[in-house]
């Protein structure tokens, strides 16, 4: 069976990268004593939290089947 695992860049990596960039910009804003920096930090926390919850849901529900393809098991069937 060929190895067909691809990293989901658009769904996992990009939201996290955007969230961390917002955190850096918010931190710079807070260092400069700008009140808008707190809004950027809050947006970062919401983005990263939502992406974490959605990733956990994908893993629990079997939507993230990359591990099953690597082990050779069909999707939805756990190894014993």
Image: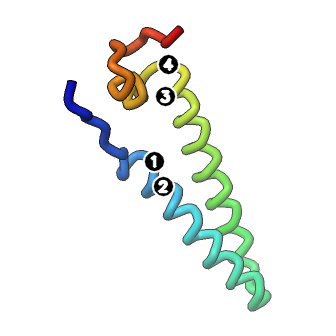
- Quadrant of res 75: top left
**Residue at numbered disc 1:** 12
Which label's residue is closer to the chain start, 1 or 3? 1
In this view, 1 is above or below 41: above
In the structure shown, which secondary structural element does the residue marked by tag 1 occupy?
helix
Q: CA distance from mark 3 to mark 4?
A: 5 Å
Question: Label 4 near label 3: C-beta < 8 Å?
Answer: yes
In the structure shown, which secondary structural element does the residue marked by tag 4 occupy?
helix
In this view, 39 is above or below 3: below
Q: Nearer the viewer, residue 67 or 12?
A: 67
Q: Nearer the viewer, residue 48 or 59?
A: 59
Q: Residues within 10 Å of mark 2 (few under 14, many from 20)?
A: some
Q: Quadrant of the N terminus?
A: top left
Question: Label 2 near label 1: C-beta < 8 Å?
Answer: yes
- Quadrant of res 37: bottom right
The number of numbered discs placed on residues in the rendered structure image is: 4
Q: CA distance from mark 1 to mark 3?
A: 11 Å
**Residue at numbered disc 2:** 15
In this view, 40 is above or below 49: below
Q: CA distance from mark 4 to mark 1?
A: 16 Å
**Residue at numbered disc 4:** 61
């Amino acid at each position: 069976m060929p190895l067909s695992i691809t990293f989901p860049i658009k769904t996992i990596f990009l939201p996290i990268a955007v969230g961390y960039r917002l955190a850096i910009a918010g931190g710079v804003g807070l260092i400069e004593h700008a009140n808008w920096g707190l809004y950027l930090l809050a947006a970062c926390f919401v983005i990263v939290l939502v992406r974490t919850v959605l990733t956990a849901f994908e893993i629990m529900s079997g939507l993230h089947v990359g591990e099953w393809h690597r082990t050779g098991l069909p999707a939805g069937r756990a190894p014993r």
